[in-house]
Image (tube, helix red, strand yellow):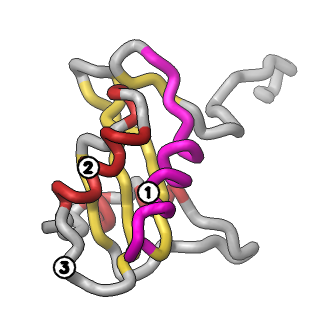
Amino acid sequence: MDEEGFLYFVGRKDDMFKSKGKMVSPREIERCLCSFEGILGAMVIGVPDEIIGNSVVAFLCLEKPGISKEDILKHCQANLEDHLVPQEIRVVPSLPVTDNGKIDKLALQRPAQQKAPICQ
């Protein structure tokens, strides 16, 4: 709300975003990713993309190294609609959390996290 009492919409509480002209639910993708053996945790965000609106980017914590990007993508393609399959998969040692213990999606969007290594 500004000084004159006008309210402004600044974001979505449900974290949904558009990709390829369709609405994307990060939670649906995260559930699919976490059902893959060897993935301990997953967080999905939309990263602005000039062509498709937002790219689907998945940040993953793995139980052990050696899980291939191709295997993860095959799992997603078999279980998700095309617009929900991540364009990028990044492996992180842990998912950042807020003081309340919730995963901090804003921290994932910072440049340091954007440079996290891509899953082999």
Image-based side of 119 in relation to 53, left or right: left
On screen, 81 above or below 41?
above
- Please give the name of the residue rendered at 32% of the width and 43% of the height, measured from the top-left corner: 86
Q: Quadrant of residue 9?
A: top right
**Residue 74 rendering spot, x and y as whole percentages:** 25, 48
User: What SS does tag 1 mark?
Assistant: helix
Whether residue 32 appears in magenta in the rendering, the answer is yes
Lower sequence index among marks 2 and 3: 3
Amino acid on which disc 2 is placed: Leu
Cα separation between marks 1 and 3: 16 Å
Assign the N terminus to one quadrant of the image. Answer: top right
Instruction: Check the image and name the residue furthest to the left.
Output: 120
- Residue under label 3: 66
Decide which of tag 1 and tag 3 comes sooner along the chain.
1
Disc sitting over residue 73 in the figure: 2
Q: Quadrant of the C terminus?
A: bottom left
